[in-house]
Image (cartoon, helix red, strand yellow):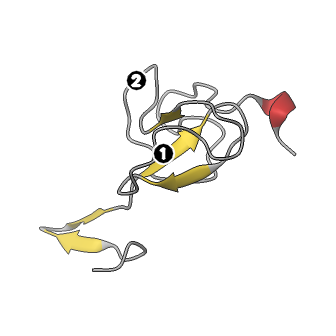
Amino acid sequence: MSTSQEVHNKNHVVQERYKLCGNCGNFCGVSENQVFCIVCGEKLMDECPQCKEPIVYPTARFCPVCGKLLVQMQNLK
């Protein structure tokens, strides 16, 4: 299975998960072994720090479940 594929399993879709940098917005697939952002060095997150929802949208700036800010907006380019 390629990393961009979705897996259909018992009437629901399992989406690809991502790690996101809360400082600069950079992201990578959760299957990659990165722990820190290659752009700014900040530790990557793979879930919302507030509600623990997995990150499934690589360009997310806010959590779609609880609305928590995930990426510091002033640091976006």
Q: Residues within 10 Å of mark 1 (few under 14, many from 20)?
A: many
Mark seen at residue 19:
1
Q: Nearer the viewer, residue 12 or 53?
A: 53
Q: Residues within 10 Å of mark 2 (few under 14, many from 20)?
A: few
Q: Which amino acid does label 2 sit on?
A: Cys
The reply, left or right, for residue 54 in relation to residue 59 is: left
Residue at 58% of width from left, 51% of height from top?
27
Q: What residue type is labelled 1?
A: Lys
Q: Which of 53 and 4 is in front in this view?
A: 4
The residue positioned farthest toward the top in the image shown:
50
The reply, left or right, for residue 75 in relation to residue 11 is: right
Residue at 46% of width from left, 47% of height from top?
34
Question: Where is the N terminus found, in terms of image quarters?
Answer: bottom left
Q: Which of 17 and 38 is in front in this view?
A: 38
Percent across and percent down for residue 50 are 45, 19
The residue positioned farthest toward the left in the image shown:
10
Cα separation between marks 2 and 1 = 16 Å
Question: Mark 2 or mark 1, which has the lower sequence index?
Answer: 1
User: Would you say residue 57 is visible in this rendering?
Assistant: no
Mark seen at residue 51:
2
Percent across and percent down for residue 40 are 71, 37
Q: State the image quarter where residue 22 is shown.
A: top right
Q: State the image quarter where residue 73 is shown.
A: top right
User: Would you say residue 59 is visible in this rendering?
Assistant: yes
Q: Nearer the viewer, residue 56 or 32?
A: 32
SS assignment at label 1: strand
Q: Nearer the viewer, mark 2 or mark 1?
A: 1
SS assignment at label 2: loop
